[in-house]
């Protein structure tokens, strides 16, 4: 049982480039989330999804896009990368209700 | 807007020296308060959920408590392997079961 898998683990982008961060879960969770974590800071919600075909903005959505075509996958797209998007990105999933999230191991992104 | 504040930002302990971490929150309609442990370079790992004031939960050397305005994570007789960042998060009544996280407390336990 792999849980939540994120790829890649590390990436360096140049300003203006685009990329997709991949996230897959094998627990049949309906709820999925993307957070970013800056040094010494807590996690900030970027986007979330309550099921296939349904997505919504979180606290810091600007510069990002998501899609949810299947229950398992929730990719995060960065268009026109900016230095302010340098961060560690975490994907998470949950059954909903009072269940805690299961997090992936993160993607460390640097924009130069 | 939901807010979560954790203190202190960092805590250095000697092995066996018990201490407490604080998580104060402002939220309309608390559904649950969550504690996570995060090791360097890894994703947060779920520890506890607390649902109502007065509730307590324990796991090994960790004990979490909840009041109407704050939660405490007590570390009893810590060991070096308890060194980590501890994150607190609240879930309010809004759609999506979203969590709002605090900034975390970095705990270092020295042998």
Image (spheres, helix red, strand yellow):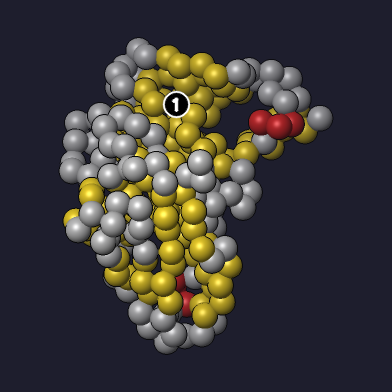
The residue lying at 30 percent from left, 30 percent from top is A98
Instruction: Locate residue B14, reporting x and y percent.
Output: 75, 27
Left or right placement of residue B104 versus residue B101 in this view: right
How crowded pointer 1 is (Cα within 10 Å; few <14, some 14-19, many 20+) is rated as many
Residue reaching furthest right? B111
- Asked if residue A86 is positioned above or below residue A13 in the image, the reply reads above
Choose top left, top right, bottom left or bottom right for residue B94: top left
Q: Chain of mark 1?
A: B
Instruction: Locate residue A26, reporting x and y percent.
Output: 42, 46
The residue lying at 44 percent from left, 41 percent from top is A102
Choose top left, top right, bottom left or bottom right for residue B52: top left
The residue lying at 38 percent from left, 83 percent from top is A80
- Asked if residue A51 is positioned above or below residue A89 in the image, the reply reads above
Left or right placement of residue B39 versus residue A85 in this view: right
Instruction: Locate residue B66, reporting x and y percent.
Output: 38, 20
Quarter of the image where the C terminus of chain B is located: top right
- Asked if residue B86 is positioned above or below residue A24 in the image, the reply reads above
* Viewer can see residue A89: yes
Left or right placement of residue A11 versus residue A98 in this view: right
Left or right placement of residue A82 versus residue A111 in this view: left
* Viewer can see residue A103: no
Choose top left, top right, bottom left or bottom right for residue B4: top left
Residue identifier under label 1: B48
Residue situated in front as seen by the camera: B89 or A7: A7
The residue lying at 63 percent from left, 49 percent from top is B40
Q: How many marks?
A: 1
Instruction: Locate residue B62, reporting x and y percent.
Output: 56, 21
Residue situated in front as seen by the camera: A90 or A51: A51
Query: What secondary structure is marked by label 1?
Result: strand
């Amino acid at each position: 049982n792999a849980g939540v898998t994120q790829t890649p683990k590390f990436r360096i982008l140049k300003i203006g480039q685009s990329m997709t961060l991949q996230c897959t879960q094998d627990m049949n969770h309906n709820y999925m989330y993307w957070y970013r974590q800056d040094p010494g800071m807590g996690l900030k919600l970027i986007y979330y999804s309550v099921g296939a075909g349904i997505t919504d903005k979180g606290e810091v959505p600007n510069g990002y896009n998501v899609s949810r075509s299947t229950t398992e996958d929730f990719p995060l797209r960065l268009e026109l990368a900016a230095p302010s998007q340098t961060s560690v990105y975490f994907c998470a999933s949950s059954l909903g209700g009072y269940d805690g999230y299961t997090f992936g191991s993160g993607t460390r992104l640097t924009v130069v | 807007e939901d807010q979560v504040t954790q203190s202190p930002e960092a805590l250095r302990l000697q092995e066996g020296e018990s201490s407490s971490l604080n998580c104060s929150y402002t939220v309309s309609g608390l559904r649950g308060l969550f504690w996570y442990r995060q090791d360097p370079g890894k994703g947060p790992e779920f520890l506890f959920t607390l649902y109502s004031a007065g509730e307590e939960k324990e796991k090994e050397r960790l004990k979490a408590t909840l009041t109407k305005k704050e939660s405490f994570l007590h570390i009893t007789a810590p060991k070096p392997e308890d060194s980590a960042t501890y994150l607190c998060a609240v879930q309010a009544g809004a759609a999506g079961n979203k969590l709002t996280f605090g900034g975390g407390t970095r705990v270092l336990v020295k042998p």
